[in-house]
Amino acid sequence: MLRMYDYECLNAKCGEVSEELVRYEDADKVICPICGSPTKRWIGAPMFDPRLGLDAASFPTMGDKWAKIRRQRKKIESARDE
């Protein structure tokens, strides 16, 4: 089964960041497409299968979570001021 992974070249002069479609078994064997150096695999965002009925857009982002925390803090601070 093929999967999409994000990679960063370990060569300091190159530093290419790429996205590669590879087999799960070969995920740690990918080399940089630019310079041929070894790469480091990044942990990517989870993928949701549309057949499960999950919409990734409906999940809160980190920005949404921080905005909620800010609203809660303002509410607490205004309650203290009263």
Image (cartoon, helix red, strand yellow):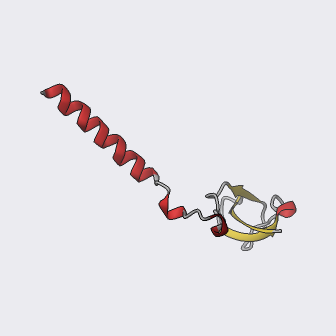
Q: Residue furthest left?
A: 82
Residue at x 87% of width, y 61% of height? 25
Q: Is residue 19 placed above or below 63 in the rendered structure?
A: below
Residue 17 appears in the picture as rendered: no
Residue closest to the eye, 48 or 52: 52
Q: Which residue is found at the position 54% from the left and 64% from the top?
A: 55
Is residue 41 toward the left or the right of residue 23 in the image? left
Q: Is residue 73 left or right of residue 59?
A: left
Rendered location of residue 13, percent (x, y) = 66, 63
Name the residue nearer the viewer: 29 or 72: 72
In the rendered image, the vertical position of residue 22 relative to residue 75, given as above or below: below
Residue 74 spot, x, y in % from top left = 24, 38
Toward which corner of the image does residue 3 lie, by quadrant?
bottom right
Using the image as rendered, state which of residue 8 and residue 50 is in the foreground. Answer: 50
Res 50 seen here:
yes
Q: How many marks?
A: 0
The quadrant of the image that shows the C terminus is: top left
Q: Quadrant of residue 24?
A: bottom right
Percent position of residue 27, x then y: 81, 61
Which residue is situated farthest in the right direction here?
25
Q: Quadrant of the N terminus?
A: bottom right
In the rendered view, tell whether residue 34 sits above or below residue 8. Answer: below
Relative to 1, is 48 on the left or the right?
left
